[in-house]
Amino acid sequence: MESNFSNNGEKQRFELELDHKIAFIDYQLTGETITMLHTEVPQDLEGKGIGSMLASKALDYATIHNLKVVPSCTFIADYIRKNPKYESLLK
């Protein structure tokens, strides 16, 4: 399954396109802090690890851009808890 990750700054969301469908994380960027608000995966892509792939790419983006993360989305908070390498990003 081929995927394409991007930061859609206009819509303030990270997008992962797969099979012409888009999974996304809505965010709010304030200075050097990114608040991840909501994760959504199209229903027919659920249960395939797409949300985790998207979370990983979004958190890697935060790492590369030296952003602190506020995980308002429970999916992102749970993902960080299960992947402690991202705990240093927490604000």
Image (tube, rainbow, N blue to C red):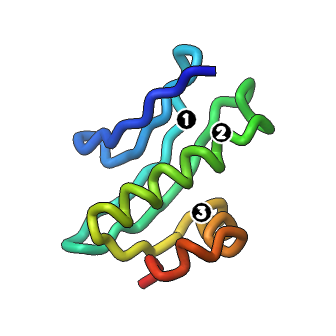
Residue 50 disc label: 2
Mark 2 and mark 3 lie on one chain; the one further toward the N terminus is: 2
User: Could you say where residue 21 lies in the image, as x and y percent from the top left?
Assistant: 55, 21
Q: Secondary structure at mark 2?
A: helix
Q: Residue furthest left?
A: 31
Q: Is 3 positioned to the left or the right of 10 in the image?
A: right
Q: Decide: marks 2, 1 in contact (CB < 8 A)?
A: yes
Q: Nearer the viewer, residue 59 or 14?
A: 59
Q: Quadrant of the N terminus?
A: top right
Q: Quadrant of the C terminus?
A: bottom left
Which of the numbered marks, if any, corresponds to residue 76?
3
Q: Which residue is mark 1?
A: 23
What amino acid type should be assigned to the residue bearing mark 2?
A: Ile
Q: Is residue 26 left or right of residue 81?
A: left
Residue closest to the far top:
20
**What amino acid type is highlighted by mark number 1?**
Ala
Q: Quadrant of residue 10?
A: top left
Q: Position of residue 85 (x, y in %)?
A: 57, 73
Marks 2 and 3, how far apart at CA: 13 Å
- The numbered mark at residue 13 is none
Q: Are marks 2 and 3 in contact (CB under 8 Å)?
A: no
Please determine whether, in this image, residue 25 is positioned above or below residue 17: below
In the rendered image, residue 48, in percent from the top left (x then y), is placed at 76, 35
**What crowding class fits label 1: few (fewer than 14 Cα within 10 Å), some (14-19), or many (20 or more)?**
many
